[in-house]
Amino acid sequence: MTPEAPAGGQSAEALRAAPGLSSAEAARRLEQVGANKLPEAGTVPGWRRLLAELTHFFAVLLWCASVLAYLAGMPQLAIAIVIVILVNGVFAYIQQERAQHAAAKLRELLPAMVSVRRDNRVVKVHTTELVPDDAVVLVAGDRVPADLRLAVAASCSVDESMLTGESEALAKAPGDTVFGGTFLVNGQAEGIVASTGGNTRLAEIAALTGKVEAPPSPLARELQRIVRITAAMALGIGALFFVLSLLVGISWRDAFLFAIGVMVALVPEGLLPTVTLSLAVGAQRMAQRNALVRNLEAVETLGSTTYICTDKTGTLTQNRMNAVEVWTPAGVLSIIGAGYSPEAEVTGKGTVEARHLSTAALAASVGRAVLHGGKWVAEGDPMEAAIHALAARLAGPGHDPGEPEVSHRFAFDPRRLRESAIVGTSLSVKGAPESVIPLCGEDGAGLALRMVDEMASHGLRVLAVAERSLPGLPGASFRLEDVESGLTLLGLIGLHDPPRAEVRLALEAAREAGIKVAMVTGDHAFTAAAIARETGLIGTPELVLEGHNLPEDDAVLTALLDRDGVVVSRVTPEQKLRVARLLQRRGHVVAMTGDGVNDGPALQQADIGVAMGLSGTDVAREAADLVLLDDDFATIIAAVEQGRATYANIRRFLTYHLTDNVAELTPFVIWALSGGRFPLALSVLQILALDIGTDLLPALALGSEAPSKGTLKRPPERRHLMDRALMIRAFGLLGPVEALFEMTAYTAVLLGAGWTPGAELPAADVLMAASGAAFTTVVLAQLANAFACRSASVPPWRLGWFSNRLLLWAVLAELGLLAVFLFLGPLATLLGHAPPSPGGLAVALAAIPGVLLADWLYKIVRHRRAGTSATATKV
């Protein structure tokens, strides 16, 4: 007599497949509902993305400067500025071209072909041809092609981690729904298509990801602020010079052209390419530390991060489930080396009993482990593979535990929290202790429950294993509630997904850096909290929130989240997105990690989306700004360090760029105040040669300065890139010192040629030599300024002259360009200068120690005012 199929289990004879549709009916429905594919998001054409890189606020300012230069009769200057815009725009476009294709990658998650019942037979059709009510046939390893309602489920479990974040495969029974994009881990199933295309759960998440617009990065906001300040200064000073020119009797046309030249001189043409290339250097360094940057601005955003929402599995843990402890009434066994080698050391009592327990647990499992390169590798569910590895270890080296001949399975049921299998005349049961132990006799139940608590307190996931004999099989008829009763408890298995060794130190570094860390995961609260305790992530007092219990009031939830060490478990994509938004409203710069499709919206919303490169889905990687090539939380902290260094570097070369603006503007101020009687020391073309010629390479070298030792010893920067301290240093000290030496060198050449103030202008060759002296002075002063800008608190000789070798090469290149600009006849004539006289050159050379001395005195005064010692660490 064949056994009846009890609830929760199916025998082959009891399975009833759906008949399926006819080909004609399927064709009619396909015409009616459309193809089974995700709606294509409206992608931005490449030409529009390139145009955006050429028309943002700073680029528009440069375009205006180019037009004004052309109107002022300086076509060479106009062309040069256009070249700067195009080169920077194309470079940024190439760097960003791989970004934001999440919707396209979502479509790749659906299989190309699928088995369906059509015309009373199983045939292969293309996934796009599926229609509602189609009968789909699935086997282990198949990806689900649409949302299905299961009609048949034999020992069936489905990996839904990409949608839910839950790391364990979930058992499915007839009547359950499985979603497109997930895949069958074990067993076989048949299901009726419930939803296709844009009506699936996968499409809902795709739509949610597409609707999320990432906020502007802190760097973007700061650059916009700098551009606004620079534009206001340029327009204001240009208007002032226009009025002054009219007052000294210059015609309105010449006054207008002169004002345009002043405005062009004040625009820092070299700033934008310097920022872009500095971010590229930071991105390259992050890649060397296993962090792949997909969005250049993310380099700096990481440095501004104040809150990290991290996933658990694979990021904090190794994503390798290991059986590390076995308890039987005969004693406790510890398995040392689990998960790494087959020659595990087994210590403790009850080896024989543990071997029997592992065999029973293996019978109730489907997943397996195989030896690969001397290590156990999971095939299927990691937990069940860990049980298989345990049985192999306890059997001893060279002994294969074999495949139990299971005649009947009762699949895992979320309501029962256990699963069973019949081997011969014995029933093997494994599951949650609270589900299995009550089905066993009372003898030893109390001790077993105490052991469960003890093992759980160590962060282990505990499984109970029991068995009973079923006399009279196979001819007996049985029901599930009859067979899963009167069990004998064999013992407990403690499973562990070990944390990464470096996570604890990384968390300590994050806290020392003023960054709050929370675990936001789809896993069970108990498992998440245990790992949080083991890694040191959880705060004091402990706060563990579950998705279904999150407060509906945003203010209440925000107050709960805004602390260090929070654990948020069982979250949905919508809830994860809500967490990111609430923290941003609180003023945090949020980094969000994720690896599944369900993480896409939150990764898109966060200021910095961090995806897993090893275990993550393409969707998560495409929605993220940063991809961890090793899935390691510690890599995030290393990337934060580089991000902060990049922020400091931007301040370094911003100070460097702005300093010579004072020296560039001073000749125009003196000319205007003198009513045109004092010759103009620099032309607009010379200023452009300074900005994008001699200045560019040292600025890039400053942008590659390595992180200092104290980078992660202080909270994230909350100041503006261009703040009061920076402007005082650039406009109030270094700039005026450069301008003083510049005008001294210029005047010295004029006076040496016999010119006196107020007299007629000297000969053209004298003016060109004097202008060459002023130009040389600014270049040499900027050479010294480059070394001074390496730190805001330490003189360059304390840092070491050779500690930034790229800066040395940049300075040598700067001197080479100076020689070219001075001695290459046609170029020198175009710029309007000539090599300086010996007196002018002497003053220019004196600018080097002059700038360094002024900077050193400033730093001493600054330290004294701040109450700090002169041995402050490098910033």
Image (cartoon, rainbow, N blue to C red):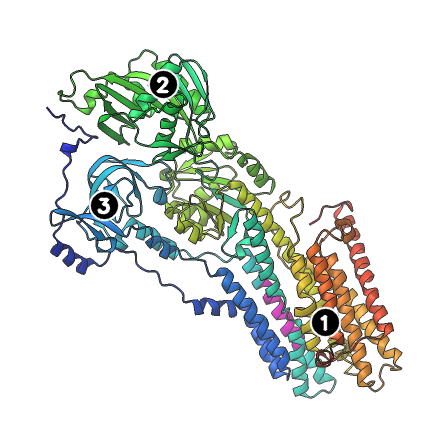
Q: Amino acid at mark 2?
A: Arg
SS type, badge 3: strand
How many residues crowd mark 3 within 10 Å: few (<14), some (14–19), many (20+)?
Answer: many
Residue in view at x 46 percent, y 45 percent:
593
SS type, badge 2: helix
Q: Amino acid at mark 1?
A: Glu
Q: Which residue is mark 1?
A: 664
Do the residues bearing badges 3 and 1 touch, measured as CB atoms within 8 Å?
A: no
Is 316 placed above or below 787 here?
Answer: above
Is 688 situated left or right of 518 in this image?
right
**CA distance separating discs 3 and 1:** 71 Å
> Which quadrant of the figure has residue 778?
bottom right
Residue stretch rendered in magenta on the structure:
225-238
Judging depth in this view, the residue of 371 and 512 nearest the camera is 371
Q: Give the image location of residue 722, x and y in percent.
A: 64, 59
In this rendering, which labeled residue sits more in front, label 2 or label 1? 2
Is 534 placed above or below 509 here?
Answer: above
Residue in view at x 85 percent, y 79 percent:
750
Q: Which residue is mark 2?
A: 355
Question: Residue 272 in magenta?
Answer: no
SS type, badge 1: helix
Q: Amino acid at mark 3?
A: Leu
Q: Which residue is mark 3?
A: 148
Q: Which mark is residue 720?
A: none
**Camera sees residue 754:** yes
Is 800 situated left or right of 288 in this image?
right
Q: Give the image location of residue 273, x and y in percent.
A: 60, 65
Q: Earlier in the sequence, mark 2 or mark 3?
A: 3
Quadrant position of the N terminus in the picture:
top left
Q: Give the image location of residue 326, x and y in percent.
A: 40, 20
How many residues crowd mark 2 within 10 Å: few (<14), some (14–19), many (20+)?
Answer: many
